[in-house]
Amino acid sequence: MAVSSCARVFPAFECRSEPDFSSANPKPEKTRSARFSLHGSSNLALSGGVSGLSSLIFRFPPNFVRQLSTKARRNCSNIGVAQIVAASWSNPSAVPTTATSASVDGAVSDGALLGSCNSNGVQFSDSVTPEASLFSSDGTIAVHAGERSGRSLVTDAITTPVVNTTAYTFENTAQLLAFKEGTHKSYEYGRYGNYTTEVAEAKISALEGAESTLFMASGMNASTVLLMALVPAGGHLVTTTDCYRKTRIFIQTFLPKMGITTTVIDPADVEALKVALDQHNVSLFFTESPTNPYLRCVDVELVSKLCRSKGTIFCVDGTFATPINQKALALGADIVLHSATKFIAGHNDVIAGCISGSEELVSKVRSLHHVLGGVLNPNAAYLIIRGMKTLHLRVQEQNNTAMRMAQLLEAHPKILRVHYPGLPSHPEHHIAKQQMTGFGGVVSFEVDGDLDTTAKFIDSLKIPYLAPSFGGCESIVDQPTIMSYWDLPPAERAKFGIKDNLVRFSFGVEEYEDLKADILQALDLI
């Protein structure tokens, strides 16, 4: 005979009575006042005389999650539990619309710990603030920023929950109007904000020392929306010769449709920048530092002074540097951009981009982003938060491996040239030493041979993956001529400085000795 699967859902357990938040005495009685038991699919006994499952749910206290058994907490979704407990606070007469200073059972007050909450006890963005002032190192900031100041009342989890929702509800029109007027903290629609994403943004803001950060669906989404938002129709843009190809394509093919003209300069040609600033009303100077794929460096402090004197916005794409190795905003840049797909997420499993800077500039980009879309999925935001907790450890290891490999390759007879800002032979080594604390995990170099010889070297490697992208835990190698520029004839590739024998090697966190042996063996085969 079939047995009901509900018969053993809950063993008998005890629960405190619901605290009276409206009472002058903030501490409820210490005695256990209610006892619940479920012995079958339809049998429910409640000593206080309350019957019905919905009544039971509405009697759950705020610390219900703590009282679940370990097994139940493992098997239940934090969000699902959160929704059940949130329902118990849906009565606005019993729960204040803002956190109070009252404490329960002698605990730290919800208001002091969590900041503003809505009437369901859900914590919102004013409590997701950078904690750079509380922590003294990038490593601690990367682990705790945006999270340590407290959780929503509905969960005690160490990790930030994934908030999967497209829209947010309001109790009534008055609450909606309060939200619109900025007196009620909440969200409205998933394209305009998400708790999980805001935690990731708070981490970047803390690391970069920024007033505000905006995450978007990809690094390209971040750069294109930024360019459209900050360069007006008919404006003028300055950028550099060495840069990510898709960024160049957008600047050369799309921006002219808006009447935007562009001056392209060598990354280190300060005189060319001065001329461009004098001859044009330059809206924005957009550059990578280090650049892709030759790792050229821009003197951020010097350039920022030149741009500021002309009222020009200065944006640095710091993807290759990461916030660990370079603080572009502290050096004077107005905005720093990252393809978070790379080092920030760090596990080759997320596509995302972000910009950081003053609230004034980021808000301009945010307004256009809300119209165009390109929203970061909250699951991706969770993975970024997870990845950032080891950012400083990964980057330190990758810095160390890349530096040693660059020195090894530069001394090898089958390597013609190595491009790495940590080497004295690099044209901007003196700049990199001034503004970077580490030189990154990517090394570009030229093999002594043609396209086929270089391809043979790459195919002989055993550890790195032959793939695009960089910055992950796994080492990745590619031949830019084939990976990124194969659709162009050799003469066109040459205009961009892309050589057939160029290799870009992103070092992961594998053991140095293993990578060394792999590279040396591959070089011996060519």
Image: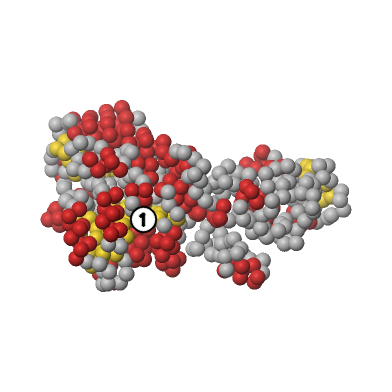
Q: Looking at the picture, tell me which residue is in the foreground, 494 or 427.
A: 427
Q: Looking at the picture, tell me which residue is in the foreground, 51 or 382.
A: 382
In which quadrant of the rendered view does residue 359 lie? bottom left
Residue 156: percent from left, percent from top? 63, 44
Q: Which residue is mark 1?
A: 335
Q: Is residue 29 above or below residue 177?
A: above
The residue at the point 20 percent across, 63 percent down is 278
- The answer to whether 228 appears left or right of 76 in the picture is left
Q: Kindly identify the amino acid type of the residue bearing the numbered disc 1.
A: Ile
The residue at the point 35 percent across, 41 percent down is 325
- The answer to whether 44 appears left or right of 152 in the picture is right
> Is residue 382 in view from this perspective?
no
Residue 512: percent from left, percent from top? 32, 30
- Taking the view exactly as shown, the residue that stands out farthest to the front is 309
Residue 291: percent from left, percent from top? 26, 49
The residue at the point 20 percent across, 40 percent down is 426
The residue at the point 32 percent across, 38 percent down is 438
- The answer to whether 287 appears left or right of 8 in the picture is left
Q: Looking at the picture, tell me which residue is in the foreground, 417 or 432.
A: 432
Q: Which colour style is shown?
A: secondary structure
Q: Is residue 247 above or below residue 174?
A: above
Helix, strand or loop under label 1: strand
> Is residue 130 in view from this perspective?
yes
Characterize the local packing of mark 1: few (<14), some (14-19) or many (20 or more) Cα atoms within 10 angstroms: many
Q: Is residue 405 above or below residue 223?
A: above
Q: Looking at the picture, tell me which residue is in the foreground, 30 or 273.
A: 273
In which quadrant of the rendered view does residue 22 lie? bottom right
Quadrant for the C terminus, please.
top left
